[in-house]
Image (cartoon, rainbow, N blue to C red):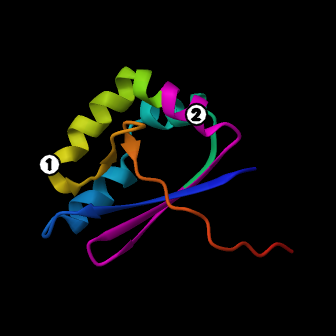
Amino acid sequence: MPEYAWVLGVRPGYEDEYKKRHAEIWPEMEAALKAAGITSYAIFRHGLTLFGYFETADIDATIAALKASETNRRWAEYMAPIMDIQIDPNTGFPYLLPKQWTMRR
């Protein structure tokens, strides 16, 4: 399964709020991610830096589905005040990181 990653930021003082909101992620948001083709997703935090890792078979279809999702739009609006997000103007999605190396079993 193809792997993707992004780096975003959480605004100073909102680290606990960010964690709380994701601990209480809306069921419909999780369903939207799955419907968009995401099979695995994890977010890690180091200080104010967030690192997201996800897997999807078709990144273009995933981005299109999330951009068309009203639930995703509402979630992004809900999260925006506590986050520092840089969006790739070519995709309308957070910048994806180029993979540098992979180790498999």
Q: Which quadrant of the figure has residue 23?
A: bottom left
Residue 81's label in the rendered image is 1
How busy is the neighbourhood of tag 1: few (under 14 within 10 Å), some, or many (20 plus)? few
Picture coordinates of residue 79, whole percent (x, y): 24, 45
Q: How many marks?
A: 2
Query: Which residue is drawn at the image coordinates 63% and 34% (left, top)?
Result: 37
Q: Is residue 62 left or right of residue 20?
A: right
Query: Which residue is drawn at the image coordinates 42% and 23% (left, top)?
Result: 69
Q: Give the Cα distance between marks 2 and 1.
A: 27 Å
How busy is the neighbourhood of tag 2: few (under 14 within 10 Å), some, or many (20 plus)? few
Dot 2 corresponds to which residue?
60
Quadrant (top left, top right, bottom left, bottom right) of the C terminus: bottom right
Query: Which residues, given as a range, are shown in magenta?
Result: 42-65
Q: Please determine whether, in this image, residue 92 is positioned above or below residue 16.
A: above
Q: Within the magenta stretch, is there residue 23?
A: no
The local secondary structure at tag 2 comes to: helix
